[in-house]
Image: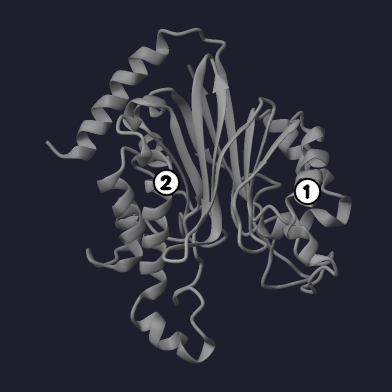
Amino acid sequence: MKLHHLFIIAALMAAVSCSNQASDNKLRLVYWNIQNGMWDGQTDDYQRFTDWVAAQKPDVCVWCEAQPIYKTGTYDKLDNIDEWRADSLLTEFWLRLGARYGHKYVFTGGHRDNYPQVITSRLPIENVERITGNPDTLVAHGAGWARIKVAGKDINIVTLHTWPHAYGYNVPAKDRDRSKAAFEGDKFRRTEMEYICKHTVLVSPDAGNGYWMMMGDFNSRSRVDNWVYRYADDDTKLLVHDYIMSETPYLDIIHEKNPDNFYSSVWGKARIDFVYCTPALAGCVVQADIITDDYTRPVKSQAVPSFREPSDHRPLIVDFEF
């Protein structure tokens, strides 16, 4: 029997276990790549954004691209852009926004640039590790490993945002065509993913029985969606998720809950935002969806045509019951 099939069986067994526990032990996760620190929200001091979040009543939020970068309504970088790399300024920003939807705890993942991930929570957050890689293996936009406690259980949260380009990391402009032709961007993402997993979920020999979730903008396609994409079996675009499915205990929660459907997580036709859970945690998932509503539907910006409003990605919401 294949390893992945064993993980699915374990998830079904965990579902029975979770269903026998107290029904009021619930957790709602909101994950969203909010495009340049919710650039669209600058026009009203993020009121539409925080009103939408408050309406979802989340317990934990994971924000990808959590830092403001550009001036309101423009493609001009903020005058104090370098100051935003300091965690104190970013934390202060999210403490202010989080207070509007009932979250008073903030965790900032590791980041080398202006594209960090941030977790806000109504529950205390333990900072386990802020990940940026090492000189041999860089994690371009960083990653993070945090922990919260729900129903007496330690819930590990791994956030990430992989390299977005077809060419390799730090490849000079004059060499990018060659790099694209060699699929170096896909290969770099695969290396990032292995590094992140080996420094988070795979540090535990019994991780499949633990409570782990991993989410982010993976900038890559999954083989389970290839009935839509129809890439060749050996296409490098599939490398990242092939690694996750073959080398880790993680299950793709959106796919597990919607196996016969395809939902884009961006303004175009692609699912590149994922929430993965280990079998023990997957068994406690009640519902998992990619959300498109009147607010979250991406619309081309008239001010900066390369941007979407409110974001070029759609949010994911996952409900757990322990």
The residue sitting at 40% across, 34% down in the picture is 257
Mark 1: which amino acid?
Ser
Say left or right for 104 vs 20. right
Mark 2: which amino acid?
His
Picture coordinates of residue 223, whole percent (x, y) = 30, 54
Counting every numbered tag in the picture gives 2
Say left or right for 288 vs 3. right
**Front-most of residues 147 and 162:** 147
Say left or right for 66 vs 215. right
Say above or below: 14 vs 237: above
Q: Splitting the image into 4 quarters, where does residue 281 fall?
A: top left
| Residue position marked by numbered label 1 in the rendering | 88
Picture coordinates of residue 53, whole percent (x, y) = 71, 37
The residue sitting at 26% across, 32% down in the picture is 7
**Label 2, residues with CA under 10 Å away: few <14, some 14-19, many ≥20:** some
Return the mark for residue 199.
Answer: 2
Q: Secondary structure at mark 1?
A: helix
Q: Secondary structure at mark 2?
A: loop
The residue sitting at 25% across, 47% down in the picture is 246
Q: Splitting the image into 4 quarters, where does residue 97 fall?
A: top right
Say left or right for 241 vs 285. left
